Image: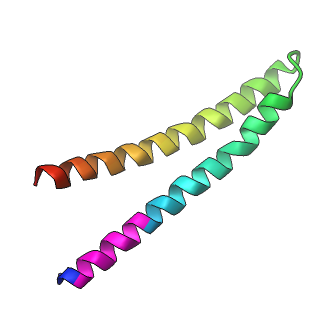
Amino acid sequence: MNEGGVKLENSFQETALYELHFWLQVLGDPGRFIHDSLAPNETEKIIAASSFIHHFDQLLMASKQQLLKKEELIFLA
């Protein structure tokens, strides 16, 4: 692939990762809002909201870990 193609591919990947991170954060926000607005006695709903928050945080962290691994490989090359 020529230099222009590599730049285009990297640009696409950077944009796609930015979008992924943005939307994972956006999708996790309702869980935080709901969690913080529940009364302490609404334990089942608190657990559900906490689970929702945890899942999106895990997805966000995993997507960032993949990015860090790729950057490490590029640095080592």
Q: Is residue 39 left or right of residue 61?
A: right
Q: How is the image coloured?
A: rainbow
Query: Residue 55: x percent and y percent?
Result: 58, 37
Region in magenta: 4-14
Q: Nearer the viewer, residue 71 or 62?
A: 71
Q: Which residue is drawn at the image coordinates 86% and 30% (left, top)?
A: 37
Indicate the position of residue 33 as horizontal and vertical percent values.
78, 38
Residue drawn at point x = 73 percent, y = 30 percent: 48
Residue 60 position, x and y percent, is: 51, 45
Image quadrant in which you'd find residue 53: top right
75 left or right of 50? left
Q: Quadrant of the C terminus?
A: bottom left
Is residue 59 inside the magenta stretch? no
- The structure residue drawn at horizontal position 43% and vertical position 48%, both measured from the top left corner, is 63
Q: Is residue 16 above or below residue 31?
A: below
The residue sitting at the top extreme is 41
Tell which of 42 and 28 is nearer to you.
Answer: 28
Question: In screen coordinates, is 15 left or right of 2?
Answer: right
In this rendering, is residue 27 above or below 50? below
Image quadrant containing the N terminus: bottom left
Which residue is drawn at the image coordinates 51% and 43% (left, top)? 59
- Residue 45 position (above or below residue 32): above
Left or right of 31 on screen, residue 67: left
Prevailing secondary structure class for the magenta stretch in the rendered image: helix
